[in-house]
Amino acid sequence: MEQPWEMVINIQTTKWKETSREIVGKRQNDGDACSMSQVGRHCERDLEREEKDIGRRRYELSERWEKRLEGYLGYTGGEQTKSLYRPRGNIIFLQILSGTERSLQGVLKVQFDTEQILKYLQKQLHVKETEPQSVCHKITHSCRCTVKKAKSQLYSFLPILKWLPRYPVKEYLLGDIISGLSTGVMQLPQGLAYALLAAVPPVFGLYSSFYPVFLYTFFGTSRHISIGTFAVISLMIGGVAVRMAPDEKFLITNTNSTNSTINQENVDARDALRVQVAVAITLLCGLIQLLLGILRFGFVSIYLTEPLVRGFTTAAAVHVFTSQLKYLLGVKTKRFSGPLSVMYSLAAVFTNIKTTNIATLITGSICVILLLGAKEINDRFKKKLPVPIPMEIIVVIISTGVSFGMSLEDTYGVHVVGNIPTGFRPPALPEYKLFSAVFVDALAIAVVGFSMTISMAKIFALKHGYTVNGNQELIALGLCNSIGAFFQTFAVTCSMSRSLVQESTGGNTQIAGLLSSFMVLLVILVIGYLFEPLPQTVLAAIVMVNLKGMFKQFADIPHLWRTSKLELAIWVVSFLASVSLGLDYGLLVAVAFAIITVIYRTQSPEYRILGQIPNTDIYCDVEEYEEVKEYPGIKVFQANTSLYFANSELFVSALRKKTGIDPGAIMIAKKKAQKRHARELKKTKQTEKKAVLKLTNDVEMAVKHELMDDDPMTDLSVNDKNGSADRNMHNSPSEELEYFMSPAINVHSIILDFTPVNFVDSVGVKTLKSAMKEYKEIGVDVLLSGCNALVVRDLTSLNFFDKNIEKDLLFHSIHDAMIHCKFKACSSALTSSEEQVLTSDTISQI
């Protein structure tokens, strides 16, 4: 069976030969009538050139058509698989064929009929018929329940049902046990320490290290992250708790201890209100995350870009560090929150630096040195150590024993953790009256917590070859926080340090997290009271040392300076805003600035003039490569952005500047030249009129004779002068018109590369249409290339195409449009040259 491209080649070969004979015959006849010596040799050369070129053009046509069909219709060659498949994408087939025909016309410099091709392809291709579905039908279909669908939804909601039956005990169990124990010994001291950041008693840190971790085992999809308390989230909660329940409200001054014998009732009341605030935030945070997960809003985290998050977490590390200084030094100051809280905290600490407790400072300094040394050893010898050295739990146990044995609280005034009740508290309903006051903070905490969780989960999933579901992670976090809020927990998220330990020690599944929660459960139920003598400075040391990884993010600044100045600006703005305004307002400012950078990028794209790499169909920036050349008379313009209301005017301005053609200026210059021509013409007429009046006013015969003798020369000179001026006005334009019209004469076509364009709106369409109309008035054609199906659909729906702008100006690629422009220019040049030859021959014969 003859393939369509083979059919086209046969048709074209025949038409080439016929066209060549007609051209030669016509020119020979013209030569007989005119000058055989001039036209005959030209026709013979053309015939010889056409005959030699037929073989080459036949091969080029064969190759181009086969590639064209491969690209457009999915054509595959071969004896057994020669067939046509349905068109790819949503581009109309007739439009593709029309563009291909124009391209071939440019290559072959002839026209041919496509009716046979259309008939053939219409037999092979059938448009899919789809019936539009109503909203009620879609809702009914989505709510329809089948066994398979119910099973899939159950597995999606409870991922443990999918992986637990397949759990390879022999391969995974040992690694999960070691990892769970290693993570558990970190979770215990960090839970106690981060409770101080959340401004609640330490026991609530233990609750937050058990319930959410236990629940995540059943609902989470990541196998390696460690859910629980985290410094940034704890600090954000603590800032709200201090704002809602400040010390001044309970007449507590100059105290940072929860077991002070002075004003103990006021301290208990303050802590109770702060716990209520933290619980209310946690419940709202969980409900927001749960709602976003059900509505499939797992993509919200993409608005928190990596530079934004890293700058934000670095600022949070600064907040955490300054808030723990008073515990490390044993200085009694109030806790600050809100804008400039870092400055206020530092000022308060340095103001009371003389009251530093030496025993507290020594204890904390020793713990910091031990923890930093252990972290360095773990990092340097992590491949040789079977498990990381659990220095945090070792420091907690040793410092608790030393504090109890030496009575550091009574003897040296070292502040300790205090009362840790054994067992769980009964579930209680959070204080709903606080919801309106903490809703905005809960929203920020929900987004930040999910962003950190999903980022770490994706890192481990990519490393170990599995996938995580962002929407299910939202649901899992929402359930952990909302259910945990009834048991007096505060909001949790993924901890970076514990997650790295859990993954590096051999953790394979969520079983490791479950075992770590059991260790915390053991402390809560049995041995929690043993940690009551633990000095608070030890917890401050643990928190500060765990900030080491966050402070290392300052190294992002030189890296981003070398790679992306705009992302560096996002990092710096996020950091400075969060440090100065607080974490809540700082996050809002950072997100707003990140969105502004997106708008800036679309409003300030890179505009390029493209040229062709010789002997290829590849087009690059002419200012970037020396080998790239422009084709005379054709400009290829590209803007790496979509066309919409925010940048449409900038697009047109850049188009005029880059191409060097300003239709408005040219039209103004033309009007000025016309006005100047009209003034000169009027002046000439007035001169002629004065000469006629002079003749009629002379009444004396002698004067008349004198005038008759003299005035013919005068009139002749005047008329000659005026005639030459008139000819100059008509035959050659004014200098001003010639100056402004030169760009339009040199450039006859502009190709707009719409490959980077993803969408257009009504304002962009109107602006583009107006610009094309202006260029058309000065004789410059504007073509579009590389439009995807969505852009073509937008252009059609927004009435871009009409009787003046047809779809014939759309081309599949820049090269297709370039070939079309070349063919059009060659045809125009050939037509004008033939007219000039005929005109000159006619004049010579006359």
Image (tube, rainbow, N blue to C red):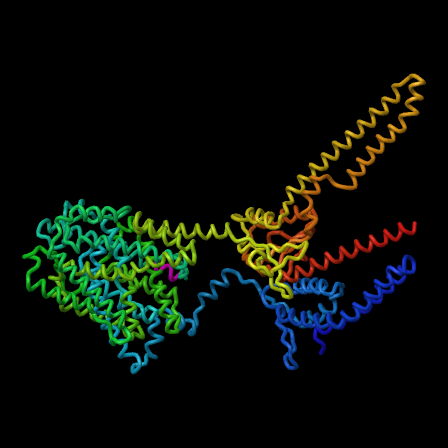
What is the x, y in percent for residue 689? 83, 26
Among the 4 quarters of the image, the one containing residue 789: bottom right
Q: Nearer the viewer, residue 24 or 291?
A: 24
Residue range corresponding to the magenta coloring? 288-295
Q: Is residue 384 above or below residue 697?
A: below
The stretch drawn in magenta includes residue 290: yes
Q: Who's the residue at 33% across and 65% down the image? A: 476
The N terminus is located in which quarter? bottom right
Q: Is residue 826 at all visible to an observer of this figure?
A: yes
Q: Residue furthest bottom?
A: 170
Q: Who's the residue at 14% across and 46% down the image? A: 253
What is the x, y in percent for residue 378? 25, 70
Q: Is residue 75 above or below residue 547?
A: below
Among the 4 quarters of the image, the one containing residue 491: bottom left
Q: Who's the residue at 76% across and 41% down the image? A: 732
Q: Residue furthest top?
A: 700
Left or right: 368 in relation to 709 = left
The stretch drawn in magenta includes residue 253: no
Left or right: 732 in relation to 28 = left
Q: Is residue 265 above or below residue 553?
A: above
Q: Is residue 15 at all visible to an observer of this figure?
A: no
Q: What is the total number of numbered labels drawn onto the structure image?
A: 0
Q: Who's the residue at 27% across and 52% down the image? A: 432
- SS majority, magenta: helix
What is the x, y in percent for residue 390? 21, 70
What is the x, y in percent for residue 189? 19, 64
